[in-house]
Image (spheres, rainbow, N blue to C red):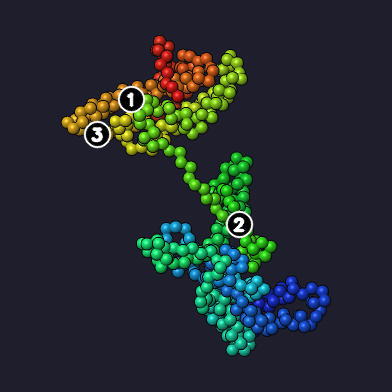
Amino acid sequence: MDSRKQKFYEAIARFIKERRDAKLKGAEAADSAQAAKYDYDTWLADAARRVAQIQMVTHVLKATHPDAKGSSLFVPPANLPARDELGSHVLGMQFAEDVVGNAAALDVYKLLRLEVEGQRLLDWLLQADTDLLAALSDNPDTARAYADAFCSLQREADSYASHTYAKQLYWCTGEDAGDDSEYILLQPMFPSSLVQAVHEAIQYSRFDVAIVEARRARRDKKPSDMQIPEYPELAIRKLGGTKPQNISQLNSERGGSNYLLASFPPIWNGYRPRSFLNLDTAFMRLLHFQDMQQQLEALARHLGTYKQRRMQQDQKRRAMEQRLGSILAAFAVTVRDSYPPGWTRDAACRLPLCEQLWLDPERARLPNRDQAQDPDGYAADEIFKAAWQRQDWPDEIAERFAQWLNQWLRDNGFAVGSVELRHFARQALVDTDWPNPIRRDLPSSRDWHTEVSA
């Protein structure tokens, strides 16, 4: 026998023997009638007959409902229209085919999936490989009949049908939603090939040896150059119950598990310009930014449990105060990134000049408003730019932050004054491009009684 033909023959014979050994036990194995079903020619003839009971597909109907009797689809992803959204079309030529139909005939698909010389038997049959045909049967007509039957696994349906249990929806294609004739009936299909690609990617991220080692290194705080893919908040949809093979072959190989990626609405944490209009100070909004209120309450609880003489060595308190200062900086960055330069020019903006400089610094780079048409606006822009050049505003913001924090503590039962005011001013993080040093030790001679209310 030709060596290449022999490779095909041995691969098929070995598969049939494994099927026989798995199926026949004890008395059945000794029964010549039962064993005869697994003769090479007998088994191939039966497989060629049973292959009509299964079909290769990319979209599975029974994933919607196991009792649905309509059509599944075989649509190669490369034949689908390209879209910006994620879909089966992104798989191109690299996709896993699924198989549906009588679960008792799935062993035929397993045979055709055997690889010889790096390619599946089905692929060799589709190419009409002469050595494989010769291995199927010594009779050329029989071999050709087997090949035609096996190749029919990859076939288009003669007709398509939906079913009562299929997922369906009416879609309006015209202008008049009240006209029933302008609707078509759509049937969304379960994209089994795409689901398999997602499953393989997630399994790789969970169990690949290199990624597992990188994850261990991260846990042990050791260096690693490996990127670790993460899929947080995964859910799993089980299909088929105790018989996942009744849905499809790929579903059976996944044990009925189908991953669902997390899908949550966005959490918006932005501010709109109108939020700062008609306000006397932006610090009225600071209390509700990020976790500022929770941090203040935690600081108040902590201050109520320790003695004043330990204040300078209290690392926990210091960390809390630094957190307050970082929230202040994040507040300013968020406002700057949320609004176009010059938003403080709005007539309804009543913020103090230092806060306008703090929250709208790019306004200093804008051209002044027309002096003839808007003399007041022109004068305001001149004042703004002059104040920017003086660069006093960072210290003024630090002072106002300290006043605001002092007032909050005072409102919550703490006796605070000028010492705390100077201390809290030093915690303020105020971004500025100006090269001059910024004061944080506020002079004690100033009048500290004008507070910024929360």
- From the top left corner, tell me how far across and down residue 110 is, in percent: 63, 72
State how far apart marks 2 and 1 are (Cα). Answer: 57 Å
Q: Position of residue 365 (x, y in %)?
A: 28, 33
Kindly report the distance in space between the C-alpha atoms of the residues bearing marks 1 and 3.
18 Å
Report the quarter where the C terminus lies.
Answer: top left
User: Is residue 1 positioned above or below 361 on the image?
Assistant: below
Q: Which residue is mark 3?
A: 367
Rendered-image quadrant of the N terminus:
bottom right
Name the residue located 62 percent from the left edge and 89 percent from the top edge: 139
Can the viewer see residue 211?
yes
Residue drawn at 64 percent across, 73 percent down: 102
Residue 20, percent from left and from top = 73, 75
In the image as oriented, which residue stretches furthest toward the right? 27
Residue bearing mark 1: 353
Q: Could you tell me residue 80's position as x and y percent?
A: 45, 67
- Amino acid under label 1? Leu
